[in-house]
Image (cartoon, grey):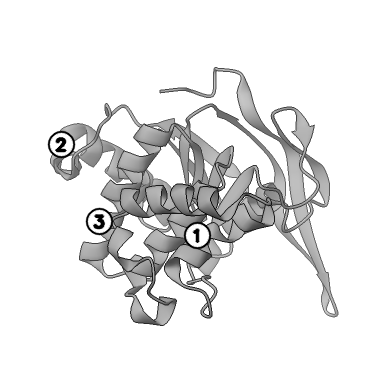
């Protein structure tokens, strides 16, 4: 797998974000640098309100940085684009479209012939185990199935990067673990590059090639740790000494930042 030492496809340089409202301005993210290489799977951890999702939204082009620059393949990010696929925590499917139509949505926007749309969409529905639910509507699906549909929709557009904002946060524990394994397998097969925001330390280690820890607000990158566990990964790696050692280190890093955020730091 790639590392940050390789030529980065995503270059975040001195990016900061200040929100301005009626009550004044709030610095949400300090000047931040992050380089992401081809096929990296970067998981981002940090306390609530530290700027994790803000950083992801700026990479997606949904928010603009106050200062600094973001470049994908050397081209400035100035707004949303098909080269970045976004999967949110909330279920974002179009309720009036079937599963197949939801997955075809971006392909239709590109003007692909309907037969090609269906071929691509059905291929990705098969990858996420939903080939038998193509004609169902979102309200007929469980939360995990809706997120699998959202993942298939993003992948069908063949994005350069996947941006995932706590996509499994609303799922029950068993479904969440199954989704983690599913995404790992798809990532290994599709060779995508992923930025993945999570609050879950076990998830961050299991999914990531690197774990980036952010400080309490105003956020900054506190540490960037490689995960020295080979792929493909089986859920049993969570019981290994390497996994447990990294979990202990990250737990302490996050605990310090949560204490700062809550004002309980001694």
Q: CA distance from mark 1 to mark 2?
A: 38 Å
Q: CA distance from mark 2 to mark 3?
A: 17 Å
Asked whether residue 73 appears in the rendered view, the answer is yes
Which numbered disc, 1 or 3, marks the residue that appears first in the sequence? 1
Residue 103 disc label: 1
| Rendered residue at 76%/42% (across/down) | 77
Q: Residues within 10 Å of mark 1 (few under 14, many from 20)?
A: many
- The quarter of the rendered structure image containing the N terminus is top left
Residue 240 disc label: 2
Residue 236 sits in which quadrant?
Answer: top left
Question: Going by the image, does 65 lie left or right of 46?
Answer: right
Q: Secondary structure at mark 1?
A: helix
* Residue 49 image offset from top left, x and y in percent: 58, 64
Q: In front: 7, or 248?
A: 7
* Residue 234 image offset from top left, x and y in percent: 18, 39
| Rendered residue at 46%/22% (across/down) | 2
Q: Are marks 1 and 3 in contact (CB under 8 Å)?
A: no
| Vertical placement of residue 112 versus 174, above or below | above
Asked whether residue 218 appears in the rendered view, the answer is no
Q: Secondary structure at mark 3?
A: helix
| Rendered residue at 30%/43% (across/down) | 206
Question: Going by the image, does 85 lie left or right of 147?
Answer: right
* Residue 109 image offset from top left, x and y in percent: 68, 57
Q: In front: 106, or 200?
A: 106
């Amino acid at each position: 797998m790639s590392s940050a030492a390789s030529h980065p496809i995503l270059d975040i340089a001195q990016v900061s974000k200040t929100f301005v409202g009626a009550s004044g301005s709030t610095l949400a993210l300090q000047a931040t640098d992050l380089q992401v290489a081809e096929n990296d799977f970067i998981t981002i951890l940090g306390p609530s309100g530290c700027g994790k999702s803000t950083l992801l939204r700026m990479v997606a082009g949904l928010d603009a940085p106050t200062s600094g620059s973001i470049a994908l393949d050397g081209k400035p990010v100035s707004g949303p684009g098909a080269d970045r696929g976004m999967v949110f925590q909330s279920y974002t499917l179009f309720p009036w479209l079937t599963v197949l139509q939801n997955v075809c949505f971006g392909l239709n926007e590109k003007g692909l012939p309907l037969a090609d749309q269906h071929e691509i969409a059905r291929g990705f529905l098969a990858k996420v185990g939903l080939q038998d639910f193509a004609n169902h509507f979102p309200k007929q699906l469980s939360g995990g199935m809706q997120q699998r549909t959202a993942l298939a929709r993003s992948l069908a557009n063949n994005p350069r990067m996947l941006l995932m904002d706590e996509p499994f946060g609303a799922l029950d524990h068993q479904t969440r673990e199954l989704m983690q394994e599913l995404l790992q397998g798809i990532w290994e097969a599709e060779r995508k590059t992923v930025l993945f925001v999570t609050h879950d330390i076990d998830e961050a280690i299991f999914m990531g090639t690197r774990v980036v820890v952010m400080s309490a607000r105003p956020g900054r990158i506190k540490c960037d740790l490689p995960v020295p566990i080979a792929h493909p990964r089986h859920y049993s790696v969570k019981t290994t000494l390497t996994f447990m050692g990294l979990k202990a280190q990250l737990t302490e890093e996050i605990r310090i930042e949560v204490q700062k955020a809550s004002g309980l730091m001694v």
